[in-house]
Image (cartoon, rainbow, N blue to C red):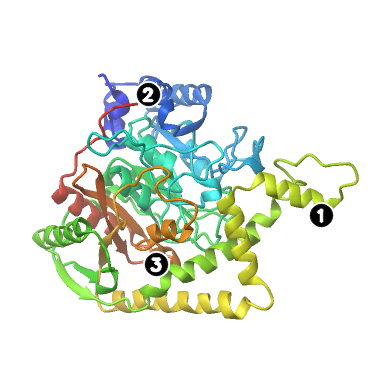
């Protein structure tokens, strides 16, 4: 078999079980693809020795007949996950040289299942960004191009390296994290599947924190079946994470029947934004028709507080970031600035943070500190928390009325060029999260499924939002949508 790196998780798993291929062969194919794709800047810390060691161990396990679904499958790990003895920088200069002495719960669960770590993936610094342009490693680049245009495009953010690596077949799948859309938006930009599970479904322990009440890990894969396989391994209760829920993890793959007859799919009127591109509007309508043809009932619904979601998110997330990032002070770990004679502890903090944090992180820390300050706490932070409760109640009311899932666009546009959204107006970049942040504020599961191409040949995705803890049902609806959309486009190899 040639081009083994182009396989998905399910195909590779079945080939491994049948003895058609070994994990070492799969891993070597991916390692070669990674070395040939430095132009994408997706993998920022390569770990070929660890990968081959784990692949050999996986082959032994498969031979012995003791092999979970993920055993022997080569994947990438977002740089936000702490990995023992391997640099884990969250794409920030301030964590330069940090090699944890422990493994995040999610990456440990994947390792225990026999998955093969190929290396660490690029991302926006501390997961703050929608285009992977805030990374200390430089921009991650999308494998897609617009028509005959050579302009480099963003793979989305913050999980841009994960998206680019999966779309370019550098790995079979990758981990991502999603605080306001950071799995779903990049997945939509590069034509892959990305699911953010219910808040508390995956442990956050050992994942560098951005906004603790919003962050959630999830898989980024080549299709819905692969997402179901990988998600099952990533989920589970963790006593080290107080927000992790003690709930049995179902066999998500077994729930993929494609039968959605009688399911009620909600179409929220508030997501019809002014200035939405016609092709996004058309794709959304086509998605609803596809689900209707599969036997679902399409219902118009209202989520009245949607218009307040983006402002509420951009108060809550920076506030939590300001609190979480206070620990990076040049004392406990990471990088410390060079101090001048006579500098005290205040100068050390100031210089370390000024040098160590990029502009976007500095911006969000300042906003967060401002909205938490004594004079503004009630005016901003407390008010945003109340709005969040109202947004959550909107969803609860809709689900209580019998809606099984909600269909929306995943992004307000296709991928854009690197450097096209300037720092001069950060709000333009923040608007990329308009369809995704509500899901994080309400703690719900959401999945992005590739559903079509725009006029320039770039992927567009649709988002499905599910009931809390019902990822299996959500994946099955996504599976029906994926089957109907029949999206098979791949980027032409230019790198």
417 is higher (above) or lower (below) than 438:
above
The spot of residue 135 in percent (x, y) is: 53, 42
User: Disc 2 vs disc 3: Cβ atoms closer than 8 Å?
Assistant: no
Q: Which residue is mark 2?
A: 33
User: Disc 3 vs disc 1: Cβ atoms closer than 8 Å?
Assistant: no
Q: Is residue 177 left or right of residue 337?
A: left
> What label does residue 440 carry, if any?
none
> What label does residue 438 carry, if any?
3
The spot of residue 10 in percent (x, y) is: 28, 37
The spot of residue 116 in percent (x, y) is: 45, 31
Residue 66, image quadrant = top left
* Residue 114 can be seen, yes or no: no
> Is residue 361 or residue 49 the one in the foreground?
361
Q: Which residue is mark 1?
A: 346
**What is the C-alpha distance between the residues marked 2 and 3?**
37 Å
422 is higher (above) or lower (below) than 91:
below
């Amino acid at each position: 078999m040639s081009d083994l790196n182009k396989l998905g998780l399910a195909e590779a798993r079945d080939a491994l079980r049948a003895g058609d291929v070994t994990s070492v062969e799969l891993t070597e194919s991916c390692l070669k693809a990674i070395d040939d794709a430095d132009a994408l800047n997706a993998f920022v810390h390569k770990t070929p020795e660890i990968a081959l060691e784990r692949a050999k161990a996986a082959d032994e396990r498969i031979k012995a007949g003791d092999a979970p679904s993920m055993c022997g499958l080569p994947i990438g790990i977002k740089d936000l996950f702490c990995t023992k003895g391997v640099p884990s920088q969250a794409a920030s200069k301030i964590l330069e040289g940090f090699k944890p002495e422990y493994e995040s719960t999610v990456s440990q669960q994947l390792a225990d299942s026999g998955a093969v770590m190929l290396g660490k993936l690029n991302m926006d610094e501390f997961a703050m960004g929608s285009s992977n342009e805030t990374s200390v490693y430089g921009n991650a680049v999308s494998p897609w191009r617009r028509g005959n245009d050579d302009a480099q495009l963003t793979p989305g953010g913050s999980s841009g390296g994960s998206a680019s690596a999966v779309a370019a077949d550098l790995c079979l799948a990758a981990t991502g994290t999603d605080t306001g859309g950071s799995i779903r938006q990049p997945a939509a930009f590069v034509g892959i599947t990305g699911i953010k599970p219910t808040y508390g479904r995956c442990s956050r322990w050992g994942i560098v924190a951005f906004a603790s009440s919003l962050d959630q890990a999830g898989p980024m894969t080549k299709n819905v079946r692969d997402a179901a396989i990988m998600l099952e391994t990533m989920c589970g209760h963790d006593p080290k994470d107080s927000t992790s829920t003690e709930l049995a993890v179902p066999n998500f793959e077994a729930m993929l029947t494609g039968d959605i007859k009688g399911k009620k799919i909600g179409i929220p009127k508030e997501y019809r934004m002014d200035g939405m591109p016609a092709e996004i509007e058309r794709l959304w309508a086509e998605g609803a028709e596809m689900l209707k043809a599969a036997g679902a009932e399409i219902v118009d619904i209202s989520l009245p507080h949607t218009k307040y979601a983006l402002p509420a998110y951009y108060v809550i997330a920076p506030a939590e970031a300001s609190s979480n990032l206070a620990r990076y002070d040049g004392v406990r770990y990471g990088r410390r600035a060079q101090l001048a004679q006579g500098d005290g502890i205040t100068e050390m903090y100031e210089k370390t943070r000024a040098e160590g944090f990029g502009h976007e992180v500095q911006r969000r820390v300042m906003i967060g500190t401002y909205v938490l300050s004594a004079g503004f706490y009630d005016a901003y932070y407390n008010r945003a928390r109340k709005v969040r409760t109202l947004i959550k109640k909107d969803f609860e009311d809709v689900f209580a009325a019998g809606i099984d899932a909600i269909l929306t666009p995943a992004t307000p546009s296709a991928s854009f060029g690197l450097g096209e959204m300037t720092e001069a107006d950060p709000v333009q970049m923040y608007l990329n999260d308009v369809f995704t942040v509500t899901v994080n504020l309400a703690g719900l599961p959401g999945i992005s499924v590739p559903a079509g191409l725009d006029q320039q040949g770039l992927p567009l995705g649709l988002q499905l939002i599910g009931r809390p803890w019902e990822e299996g049902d959500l994946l099955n609806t996504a599976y029906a949508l994926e089957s109907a959309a029949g999206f098979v486009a791949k980027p032409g190899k230019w790198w």
